[in-house]
Image: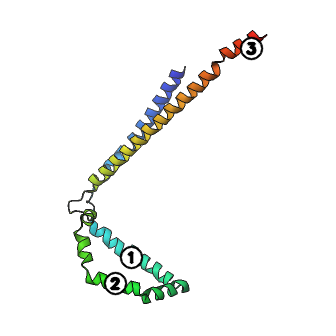
């Protein structure tokens, strides 16, 4: 009986999928095929320049109007610590050293950057993470089951207590 119900649900669902495909395939065929352009860093930075940076500038302009921040900024501008820090950075070749470090070179995207390869790497790392989590949870479940099995065995193992009660009578 259960198999008959499962089979009928399977057939009805397959018929529904077939009906959807029958209705949507002609519409999908009529859609013009567009070439997907590769990821463009220039578009990203131009959007950032036109949208994000003005929003950040407006935020800091609004914050600079607060009296407490005005006093903090004036104290910071007058501090000798900041002046000495500015002087040290102008005298040293700190920016050149930072640009030459391998960390900054790793952060700058190469010209042959591929978004698909980047996504593949992210997905493979998340898959590894999920597999590790799965393994950890399965070991936890196994230890919990073993503990439960020991508890039930100890509860059932009251033979000697029953024997003591019988012999005392």
Q: CA distance from mark 2 to mark 1?
A: 25 Å
Residue at 20% from the left image edge and 60% from the top image edge: 112
**Res 169 quadrant in image:** top right
Farthest residue to the front: give it. 168
Q: Mark 1, residues whose alpha carbon is within 10 Å: few (<14), some, or many (≥20)? A: few
The circle drawn on residue 165 is 3
The location of residue 104, given as percent across then percent down, is 27, 66
Q: Is residue 118 left or right of residue 111?
A: right
First reached walking from the N terminus: tag 1 or tag 3? 1
Q: Between tags 2 and 1, which lies in front?
A: 2
The image quadrant that residue 24 belongs to is top left
Q: CA distance from mark 1 to mark 3?
A: 84 Å
Left or right of 169, for residue 69: left
Q: Who's the residue at 74% across and 14% down the image?
A: 165
Query: As rendered, which of 45 and 102 lies closer to the eye?
Result: 102
Rounded to the nearest angstrom, the CA distance separating label 2 from label 3 is 89 Å
SS for tag 3?
helix
């Amino acid at each position: 009986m259960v198999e008959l119900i499962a089979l009928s649900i399977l057939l009805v669902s397959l018929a529904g999928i077939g009906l959807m495909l029958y209705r949507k395939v002609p519409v999908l065929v009529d859609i013009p095929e567009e070439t997907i352009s590769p990821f463009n860093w220039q578009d990203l930075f131009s959007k950032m320049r036109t949208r994000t940076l003005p929003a950040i500038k407006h935020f800091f302009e609004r914050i600079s109007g607060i009296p407490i921040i005005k006093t903090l900024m004036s104290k910071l501008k007058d501090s000798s610590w900041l002046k000495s820090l500015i002087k040290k950075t102008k005298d040293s070749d700190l920016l050149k050293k930072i640009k030459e470090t391998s960390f900054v070179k790793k952060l700058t995207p190469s010209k042959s950057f591929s978004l698909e390869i980047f996504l593949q790497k992210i997905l493979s790392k998340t898959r590894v993470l999920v597999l590790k989590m799965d393994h950890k949870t399965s070991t936890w479940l196994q230890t919990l089951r073993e503990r439960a099995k020991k508890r039930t065995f100890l509860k059932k193992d009251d033979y000697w207590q029953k024997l003591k009660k019988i012999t005392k009578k």
